Image: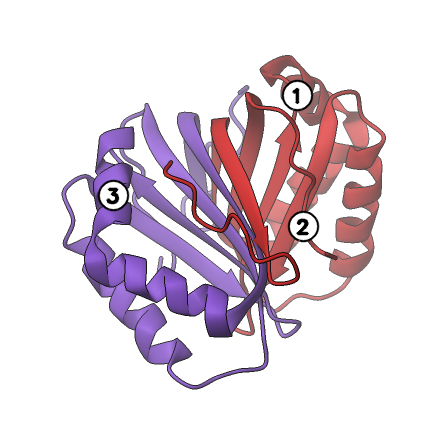
Chain colours: A red, B purple
Amino acid sequence: MSGFAPRPQTPYYAVIFTSQRTALQAGYGETADRMVALAAEQPGYLGVESTRGEDGLGITVSYWRSLEDIKAWRAVAEHRAARDQGRADWYSHYELRIAKVERAYGWDAVDDAPGDPGL
Amino acid sequence: MSGFAPRPQTPYYAVIFTSQRTALQAGYGETADRMVALAAEQPGYLGVESTRGEDGLGITVSYWRSLEDIKAWRAVAEHRAARDQGRADWYSHYELRIAKVERAYGWDAVDDAPGDPGL
């Protein structure tokens, strides 16, 4: 399915980035696309899920093998510059959470099982 | 800011639910709203962030004090019934991840600091 991250073996890490966009569009789409591509090249990258509603509220969750991998990605100069521009131009508010994924499962209508294991 | 969950003291838990909607609309909005309201009444509930793009891909992250609180919420009969109907009617695919939030921060354009602590 398009838009979903893979389901690697737990434990791994999630960076949950919830953000409210400003009305400024210039440069945003290109930079967002570039960051997705650049993240995918980093060690420990496991995948990403991202969506944004018409109200400008977006959630992007990226998945990583370790906290060290997340730290290294956040130190990449081009990523730092994008975050600086994000605060200057593109976001009015955001929350960022780093979380250790302990359990995970998925469900698809095609096979229709198991949809709801006893977590 | 509307749409953001509070920032409780870590650690706490996140349920990351990423889903692809079908074209079926009947009952979905009412049930989704009801589940948000019902979740908020449960012990250990800390907040929720949710958005869905025009392509039907949505991410909802609910936050909880403990794994036991999540388990209890998932056992609520009305929630179980909603999940069953979700698989029957409203979703073509979903991924669910339970993760322990270890670090968190937020940023707002009004105060503009600190936006990017060294996580």
Q: Marks 1 and 3: which is nearer the front?
A: 1
Residue at figure coordinates x 57%, y 58% from the top left: A112
| Mark 1 surroundings: few (<14), some (14-19) or many (≥20) residues within 10 A | many
Chain letter of disc 1 in the image: A
Disc 3 residue type? Leu
* Residue closest to the far bottom: B26
Q: Is residue B118 above or below residue B29?
A: above
Q: Which mark is residue B46?
A: 3
Residue identified by numbered label 1: A65
Residue at figure coordinates x 56%, y 32% from the top left: A14
Disc 1 residue type? Arg
| Mark 2 surroundings: few (<14), some (14-19) or many (≥20) residues within 10 A | some
Q: Quadrant of the N terminus of chain A?
A: bottom right
Q: Quadrant of the C terminus of chain A?
A: top left
Q: Which sits in the foreground, A11 or A41?
A: A11
Q: Which sits in the foreground, A43 or A28?
A: A43
Chain letter of disc 3 in the image: B
Q: Which mark is residue B108?
A: none
Asked whether the viewer can see residue B66, the reply is: no
